[in-house]
Image (cartoon, grey):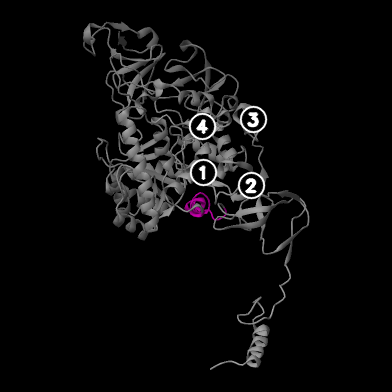
Amino acid sequence: MRTTSLELAIRCLAHAVVLASSTWLAGCSVTESPAPLEITKVGCAGCTVLTGGTVFDGSRAAGATVVLAGGRVEQVVFDDRGVEFAGGEVVDIAGKTVLPGLIDLHVHSLSAAGPYAYYDGDLHLEDHTKAMLRAGVTSYLDLGSSQRVIFEQRARARAGEILAPQLFAAGPLLTPTGGHPCLQGSPPGDFCVFIDSPADVGDAFAALLPHEPDVIKIVIDSEGTRSRPQISGASVAAIEEAASAAGVRVIAHVEEAADVEIALDAGVTLFAHIPDQDLVSGELARRMAAAGAVVVPALSVMDGLYRVAHGALDELDDPALRDDVPADVIAALRDPSLLAETTTARYRELVEGWRGHAMANLLTLVQAGVTIAAGTDAGNPAVFHGRAMHREVALLVEAGMPPLAALAAATRTAADVLGRPDLGRIEEGSIADLLVVDGDPLVDVRALERVSRVYRAGVLLDRDALALPRGTSLARQPRTGAGPGETCLAAPECGDGLSCSPDQRCAAICDRPSACAPGSACLFDGGSPTGGSCVAGDGCDVFAQACENGAACVFLGNGATSCWYAGAGSGGQPCDALFACAPGSVCDQETSTCKDLCDPRGERTGPCPGGRKCVDGSKFAGLPVPVGMCE
């Protein structure tokens, strides 16, 4: 039936009344007046108002104004409303993007990011903290450091004694005896806790839980082509059960698809690393998605090794790198002797495959609906603290994630993994940890590298002052006067006559072995302004070599012996980066060679092999039994 002109006019008039939201009505020439722009007052005395730019709130991006007050986000006003400034500091961010502070879910705070063959006695903890703040990493999860050091750092950061990102920590790693990362043995201490059966879990948790770890990290490392001990599925299940009872989440280090299956069978659904030794099947990816698995891929690790192997560390030529990375580390990454093992043709071939597997697996998991959260494994070769997060997000995009999802992985999703809904987003009431960059990372993800401003709990950081050459201290309440045996993070914290020893305890200052009490050795730390400190030994027997976990018993001098990391060298072979040799040998640091231990009297050892002589070192060793080295 046709409609007459009069009927059409009447219908148009009726529609214009009822559908006031439409500007033009189909088939009608009736124009509606635009709704008046809603004006919102923003700001207050003492507030900071960021306006004129794009805001990524952790889920979406649009033009908006953000108001910070009292360390929190007070208002977020998107551009569909006008704003009227009612006070505070108004900052024009036209051409810039505001994001939640980045969250790195895989950091090793004490590792220096140099070659694996490089060793630096300085913890560089403050250097790494500065680099993360400068990069806009305002929260991070440490997944493997000395528990005494990292929990002390966390306590001081939470108490406001130091300027630092929000710090979460696992403490030591739960791994089988001789497993990754303590492959060559480890002295009794607080970096690895050894789980060889479910019966070991109770004691491990009794020692660890009083420190209130934010997560429990376990190492699942399928044997594959390697001959490493593997944690049993029963042990993983016992760990998951104990952690669940304590209200702590378990995160599993994995390298192969089989590792993921072991974890899922035990109820573990949070993963550090994406498998890189092989490919993840679609079936396994769908199983992970159904289980609600979250993967922290740390693509930066294989990417860093790939670039090291292929000589593609272009950033080493950028003078600005020294603002974030210690000069000695940069020099080490240029040293062919330290890179020898990671630049061979065979290694280049291997690492190219590993990187390819990781990138392909990420796309498989994303397509299956597995949740991805960002982390870098900072501290590995060329995985620089702070800067690596910018590269990690870019790698997520390169592997196939949309930029919006990659940015969410580094903010809101990462905060959800930590159980912190007040982090990783820009919304009313969230903590005002913000990153401002030049440009739009949703269009060009490398815009994350162009950091303009960083706010930590609403306070604008002086990024220039935090550059390493400036030497600015992060201490807000410097500590002094710590007594013997107390934990220290720097030499000035210890009382008169004491130094911060290499194992981070205040100990007597020394300049020669005889300056220490018998049974303690004078050890020198290149990063300490006070020189040497007296470190007590544990009394192990250098001939019996009965240290736990394959560690090597070495003599330190002045009657001190101690279980130390074991290496592979002996009989004149080079010491490794930790000055370690195989059990029964000791590192001569003057020549950096491993010398076999021997008994000058021949009572506890036979003659030195190869016609070498047993040179008596009893005077230096100060032990109740004669001891020497084969030379």
**Screen quadrant of the C terminus:** top left
Q: Marks 4 and 3: which is nearer the front?
A: 4
Q: Give the Cα distance between marks 4 and 2.
A: 30 Å
Q: Which residue is mark 3?
A: 472
> Callout 2: few (<14), some (14-19), or many (20+) C-alpha neighbours within 10 Å?
many
Q: Which residue is mark 1?
A: 140
Of 456 and 210, which appears nearest the observer? 456
Q: Marks 4 and 2: which is nearer the front?
A: 4
Q: Is residue 631 left or right of residue 99?
A: left
Residue 412 forms part of the magenta stretch: yes
Q: Marks 4 and 1: which is nearer the front?
A: 4
Magenta span of residues: 404-422
Per the image, label 2 sits on a secondary structure element best described as: loop
Residue 170 in picture, x, y percent from top left: 45, 42
Which residue does the image show at 67% across and 61% down from the upper left?
A: 79
Amino acid on which disc 3 is placed: Thr
Q: Give the Cα distance between marks 4 and 3.
A: 24 Å
Q: Which residue is mark 2?
A: 457
Amino acid on which disc 1 is placed: Tyr
Q: Give the Cα distance between marks 1 and 2.
A: 15 Å
Which residue does the image show at 36% across and 53% down from the upper left?
A: 364
Q: Which residue is mark 4?
A: 315
Residue 340 forms part of the magenta stretch: no
Amino acid on which disc 2 is placed: Ala
Of 325 and 562, which appears nearest the observer? 325
Name the image quarter holding residue 190: top left
